[in-house]
Amino acid sequence: MEIDAAVRASSDGRLRTKYDNAVYVVQRAFALYPFEEIAFSFNGGKDSTVLLHLIRAGYYLHKTSCGDEAQINTVQNCPLRTIYFETPCAFPEINSFTYETVSTYGLPLETIRSDFKSGLEGLLKEKSTKAIFIGTRIGDPNAVGQEQFSPSSPGWPPFMRVNPILDWSYRDVWSFLLTCKVKYCSLYDEGYTSIGSIYDTVPNALLSDSSTGNSFRPAYMLSDGRLERAGRAKKTSNNTETNSVASNGMNNAEGEQMIARSASVIVVGDEILFGTVEDKFGAALCKKLHEIGWRVSHVTVVHNEIDSVAEEVKQCKSTDDVVFIFGGLGPLHSDISLAGVAKAFGVRLAPDEEFEEHLSQLIGNSYIGDRNEMALLPEGITELLHHKMLPLPLIKCKNVIILSATNVDELDMEWNCLLDTQESGLLRTKPFVSKHLSTLLPDVKIAPVVAKLCLEFSDVYIGSHRISRTGPLVVSLIGKDYQRVEGAAAKLSGSFEGLFSQVDSCK
């Protein structure tokens, strides 16, 4: 069988592994369901073209493994029931390629000229269909939550979605098509990298040929698969900015400035809990958050255990505006932070094609196996935070930001990038004002005065600590209103005339 032979002869180990996994899914489907109750959804695009040839190879291998020698020479083309949803907004080249391909490989075609859901309902009523092969890949809008075998969504006709190429990347798709030397739609040679309708698809500008000015290079020359959909027309938002006034007379911007947003910090590291190394991240990040007017509600160090991370994230994400996580990132068995975040949100880890492309550009093919395990991210909740200074984008899952810094200098760089990135959610608010007063008075002497002060200045944080057991007591007053902080400090000093002095810091 020419497809199987071409892949086996390839020196691309990643492609061979992807192929083996995909044809196993195909063979498994043929073993689970009667052939006449399986269908193939074909749309003429590159992904479904790959799937067509994987089905042909899988069917051939399935028949071979069953010892059906009499049919070996007749199964080259797998006469599987094929569904094509034809729309008036499809490219003529897509239609032409679809019908030509169906004829070439002897596929019994059923053309449907209605929307996908209605068409499936009619199709399944007309003929029993238990499973449908679909060319969905991770990163597609409808891929969230899907596995290689996924029942149809609630409210849809019941059938099993079979997704053999779910974990394939853009690079994998083109590696397969070029290795197997199979024909694909001509639009891909004209710079189209992801094809929708004639109304929302243009050639990918990244493939523009500067030497001619009016032509494009082929889709397989796109070096960065993350930008596959760059040729899809962008829809603009209808949202408009408003300048409403809050009930206290401040506008929204002023109100936002006065709010003390809260954050929590989770450090993942057995080495810290064992006393092998000292945690420097928590204190450094607390200082940075304080400088932009944020309150830190919680700093904790947890074991490199999925449940430990999940428990902390689950608690903090519902009470704080942002949760920061350090440590536990990478390919080692102890790198479980992302798995813990996924468990806290009740989602699975799934391959993220965009992040995998970033990793490939950074470390090449240094990883082994059929996929880069470091590119498994919490599905459906992950946003990548990009910045020109970052070697890799930072990972944000809802309100949880996973930092990859391994030292304070790297933290400084990542922090500056976060502040420069609107998507991080780190809104600068009015900074805290602080006053630190030192005294040699005993605790019992000032305790009643400080207690009353806390009631009178409830918007000012008042705390204290001793530098040493016999040394001075430092009282810290922190708030966002300068006048209120000054007022509280003046009242404390006035209660003990000449016995308090101001110090520059709380140290």
Image (cartoon, rainbow, N blue to C red):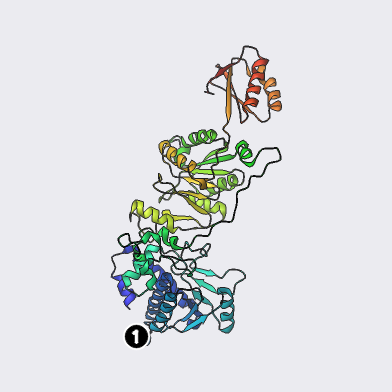
Name the one closer to the observer, 363 or 391.
391
The amino acid beneath tag 1 is Asn
Residue farthest along the bottom direction in this orientation: 70
On the image, the x and y values in percent for residue 489 come to 63, 21
Name the one closer to the observer, 18 or 420.
420
Bin the neighbour count of mark 1 within 10 Å (Cα to Cα): few under 14, some 14-19, many 20 and up.
few
Which of the 4 image quadrants contains residue 156?
A: bottom right
On the image, the x and y values in percent for residue 175 come to 34, 66
Q: Does 262 sit above or below residue 140?
A: above
Q: Does 498 sit above or below residue 113?
A: above
Q: Residue at x 46, y 84 (%)?
A: 108
Q: Is residue 16 visible?
A: no
The residue that label 1 is drawn on is: 73
Which of the 4 image quadrants contains residue 26?
A: bottom left
Name the one closer to the observer, 163 or 203.
203
On the image, the x and y values in percent for residue 66 come to 40, 81
Residue farthest along the top direction in this orientation: 498
Q: Is residue 22 visible?
A: yes
Q: Does 265 sit above or below residue 91?
A: above
Secondary structure under the numbered disc 1 in the rendered image: helix
Q: Residue at x 54, y 53 (%)?
A: 343
Q: Residue at x 36, y 66 (%)?
A: 174
Q: Does 65 sit above or below residue 364?
A: below
On the image, the x and y values in percent for residue 187 come to 39, 71
Q: Quadrant of the N terminus?
A: bottom left
Q: Is residue 502 left or right of residue 40?
A: right
Label total for image: 1
